[in-house]
Amino acid sequence: MATPLISPSILSADFARLGEEVRAIDAAGADWIHVDVMDGHFVPNITIGPMVVKALRGHTQKPFDVHLMITPVDPYLQAFADAGADIITFHPEAGPHAHRTVQAIKALGKKAGVSLNPGTPAKMLDYLYEEIDLVLVMSVNPGFGGQSFISSQLRKIEAIRKSIDKVGRAIHLEVDGGVDAVTARQCLDAGADVLVAGSATFKGGPDCYAANIAALKGAG
């Protein structure tokens, strides 16, 4: 099994020192930086906007994996692209037209991802595989960090992996929610190749980040 990419979620970082935290996880071996954007409407929490993404952009050269949990999503794509997002992921429920949103992200020169909530079926992706670069399976209900992994999502990961392999395109399969050294292995066995980890990365403080990331990579 290939070593997974690790995309630490800064939702679990110390927000009083975000720039330092991003530099620390970069140095500790993070492959991507996962940025959770929540609007208090699509999900029951409010986090950060494009100004913070722009402020963090100078702290790392690693790809910014920006997960937009906002609705409507289309009016904000340009702002996050301009702020330095490399991958922009949205939820089809935030549409109203998922294919159009994918086209808009690609037109901005960014990679397009689609995220599925625990109750959203894999078949939502059936007519998007030819366009997208990433699928993000939520293994918790979005809105807050530190939740427990929903094991039913493993079947969804397996189904999506089969569909990706059938299409034959290089599409990343990412999992977010309750990922630790144990559930990471389950996700990878099911077909994921990118792991988002908030609490599992940031626990113990900066001196532990490298070991935390190495443990997740070792799950592969």
Image: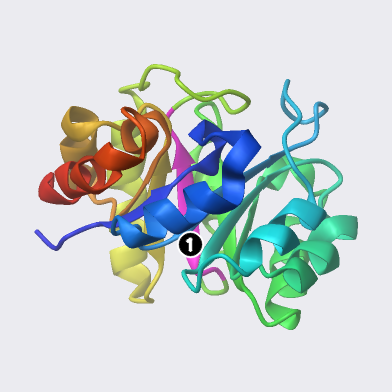
SS assignment for the magenta stretch, majority: strand
Q: Is residue 155 left or right of residue 196?
A: left
Task: Give 203 or 66, whichever is nearer the viewer.
Answer: 203
Residue 135 located within the stretch drawn in magenta:
yes
Task: Residue 105: give x, y in percent of width and height.
Answer: 72, 71
Residue 129 lies, with reference to residue 35, above or below; the image says: below
Q: Quadrant of residue 17?
A: top right
Q: Is residue 37 visible?
A: yes
Residue 114 found in image quarter: bottom right
In the picture provided, is 134 more to the left or to the right than 59?
A: left
Left or right: where 90 falls relative to 181: right
Q: Please name the residue shown 33% across and 43% down the image.
A: 157
Tell me the residue that label 1 is attached to: 134
Q: Looking at this view, is 117 or 33 the one in front?
A: 33
Q: Is residue 77 left or right of residue 112?
A: right
Q: Measuring from the top left, give residue 94's x and y in whole percent.
A: 77, 43
Q: Which residues are magenta?
A: 132-139
Say which amino acid is labelled 1: Leu
- From this view, report whether residue 36 is shown above or below residue 160: above
- The residue carrying pointer 1 sits among few (fewer than 14), some (14 to 19) or many (20 or more) residues within 10 Å by Cα, namely many
At x 47% / y 25%, what residue is drawn?
A: 140
Where's residue 122, x and y in %?
Answer: 47, 43
Image quadrant where residue 31 sits: bottom left
Label 1 secondary element: strand
Residue 204 x, y percent position in the rendering:
31, 28
User: Does residue 127 appear in this view?
Assistant: no
- Does residue 168 show up magenta in the picture? no
60 above or below 161?
below
- Counting the numbered discs, the total is 1
The quarter of the image holding the N terminus is bottom left
